[in-house]
Image (cartoon, coloured by chain):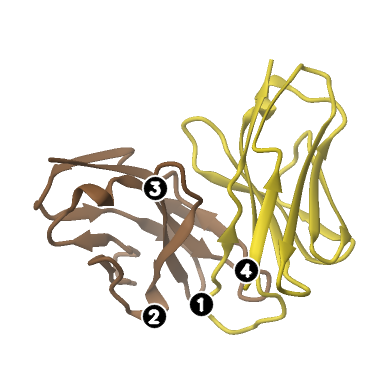
Chain colours: A yellow, B brown
């Protein structure tokens, strides 16, 4: 069966420090991968998605970047964190290559980031 | 522009009462709509999707294209239904991107 792991679960980082959140998926190949953020009082916002190794699409301009160095690995990074980067970050995956309707996306457990 | 709106941040009902979580969308194409749920201390998970026309845990949702709505309903709420509910729109079939509403917290009181 497929599983998704995301870490760290919680971190507190000072302003200006770097960030690296990692996500891996097991039990499937060539998944579509996503990073979402849930900021206080707001809904889930799609930050990045990837349909293949090295292919990253950014949905919103921001202080963050994403990379996909391996098929089932998705990394969210920042060189210098801002206070506004605080929030709950969710990694997600979907079986890739499907053109049929009914896209089911599966989510990781999330990472709480507090920038102080 | 593609948008999902959930007008209620919090919905509080008593056990056994009917529940309706509202969701309206804006999308120029043929929409694919979903409801996701996040119970306390659990990950976000799919509850149901309009294309399946299914009932999960007593919840149903009907796509109304005329009103551009996909409201989630349950005739008799249970305490275990207390959770955060997100309505989501799939904007593209092959990328699978989901656009979420802001979420509604459902609180079912005993």
Are the residues flagged by discs 4 and 3 in contact, CB closer than 8 Å?
no
Residue A19 sits in which quadrant?
top right
Q: Which residue is mark 1?
A: A102
Q: Choose mark 1 or mark 3, whichever is in front.
A: 3
Q: Choose mark 4 or mark 3, whichever is in front.
A: 3
Residue B1, visible in the rendered structure: no
Dot 4 or dot 3, earlier in sequence: 3
**Residue depicted at 12% across the width and 55% down the height:** B18
Q: Which class describes the residues within 10 Å of circle 4: few (<14), some (14-19), or many (20+)?
A: many
Q: Position of residue B75 (x, y in %)?
A: 13, 62
For disc 1, the chain is A
CA distance for labels 2 and 1: 8 Å
Side of B3 where B8 appears, left or right: left
On the same chain, marks 3 and 2? The answer is: yes
Side of B73 where B83 appears, left or right: right
Q: Which residue is mark 3?
A: B39
Q: Which residue is mark 2?
A: B52
Are the residues flagged by discs 1 and 4 in contact, CB closer than 8 Å?
no
CA distance for labels 2 and 4: 17 Å
What numbered label is drawn on residue B96?
Answer: 4
**Residue depicted at 43% across the width and 65% down the height:** B34
């Amino acid at each position: 069966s497929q599983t998704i792991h995301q870490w760290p679960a919680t971190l507190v980082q000072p302003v200006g420090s770097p960030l690296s959140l990692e996500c891996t998926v097991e039990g499937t190949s060539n998944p579509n991968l996503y990073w979402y953020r849930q900021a206080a009082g707001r809904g889930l916002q799609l930050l990045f998605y990837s349909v293949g190794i090295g292919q990253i699409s950014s949905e919103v301009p921001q202080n963050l970047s994403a990379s996909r160095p391996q098929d089932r690995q998705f990394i969210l990074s920042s060189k210098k964190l801002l206070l506004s980067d605080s929030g709950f970050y969710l990694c997600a995956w979907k079986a890739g290559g499907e053109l049929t309707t009914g896209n089911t996306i599966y989510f990781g457990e999330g990472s709480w980031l507090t920038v102080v | 522009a593609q948008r999902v709106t959930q007008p209620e941040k919090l919905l509080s009902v008593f056990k056994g009462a009917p529940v309706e979580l509202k969701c309206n969308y804006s999308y120029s194409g043929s929409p694919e709509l979903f409801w996701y749920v996040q119970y306390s201390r659990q990950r976000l998970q799919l509850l149901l999707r309009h294309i399946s026309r299914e009932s999960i845990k007593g919840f149903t949702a009907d796509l109304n294209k005329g009103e551009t709505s996909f409201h989630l309903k349950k005739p008799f709420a249970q305490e275990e239904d207390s959770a955060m509910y997100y309505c989501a729109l799939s904007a593209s079939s092959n990328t699978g991107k989901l656009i979420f509403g802001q979420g509604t917290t459902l609180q079912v009181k005993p």
